[in-house]
Image (cartoon, rainbow, N blue to C red):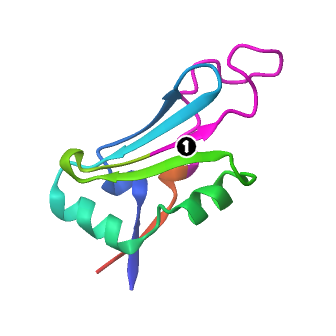
Amino acid sequence: MTTKSLGELAHVVRSKNAKPFRLTFDVIFRDSSTYERVKAAKVITPASVTQLYGLQPGELLSLHEFDAGLAIKFTLRRRTTQGSLGDTDIYGCQQHAPLLDIQVPWP
């Protein structure tokens, strides 16, 4: 079976701050058939996100499949408060990059 990367399949993959202590992620698709295939493949789950981002228990705050918006959304706790010493991404807009390489089984 072949695969395609999430970056190839999604219309939008983004991350951003959700207040100073949280990051939120959106993976949005152009059409329902692609969204449904990715959703059915179960490549974005609490377990996969926890592993991908090296999270500790309690750091993944939510993960939702939003059918009306053809989107998968999740929020995690920021390891560093926004704008504090050691914060390397004050806007949280570069944290989505690891999602782009997720491989999705594709017929």
Q: Residue at x 72, y 22 (%)?
A: 81
Q: Nearer the viewer, residue 65 or 8?
A: 65
Q: Reply above or below: 88 against 57.
A: above
Q: Residue at x 26, y 59 (%)?
A: 35
Q: Nearer the viewer, residue 69 or 33?
A: 69
Give left or right: position of 90 versus 10.
Answer: right
> To which quarter of the image does residue 4 belong?
bottom left
User: Does 89 lie within the magenta span?
Assistant: yes
What secondary structure is the stretch in magenta mostly built from? Answer: loop
Label 1, secondary structure: give it: helix
Could you say where residue 20 lies in the image, as x and y percent from the top left? 63, 19
Which residue is the extreme one toward the right?
85
Count of number-bearing discs: 1
Q: Nearer the viewer, residue 70 or 97?
A: 70
Q: Reply above or below: 86 against 78.
A: above
Q: Nearer the viewer, residue 83 or 63?
A: 63
User: Does 91 lie within the magenta span?
Assistant: yes
Q: Amino acid at mark 1?
A: Ala
> To which quarter of the image does residue 51 belong?
bottom right
Give left or right: position of 12 versus 81.
Answer: left
Region in magenta: 74-98
* Residue picked out by circle 1: 97
Could you say where residue 11 lies in the image, as x and y percent from the top left? 29, 45
Could you say where residue 23 lies in the image, as x and y percent from the top left? 57, 33
Q: Residue at x 41, y 57 (%)?
A: 6
Give left or right: position of 47 versus 57.
Answer: left
Give left or right: position of 13 versus 24.
Answer: left
Could you say where residue 64 lies in the image, as x and y percent from the top left? 40, 51
Quadrant location of the N terminus? bottom left
Which residue is the extreme one toward the bottom?
1
Q: Residue at x 50, y 61 (%)?
A: 102
Quadrant location of the C terminus? bottom left
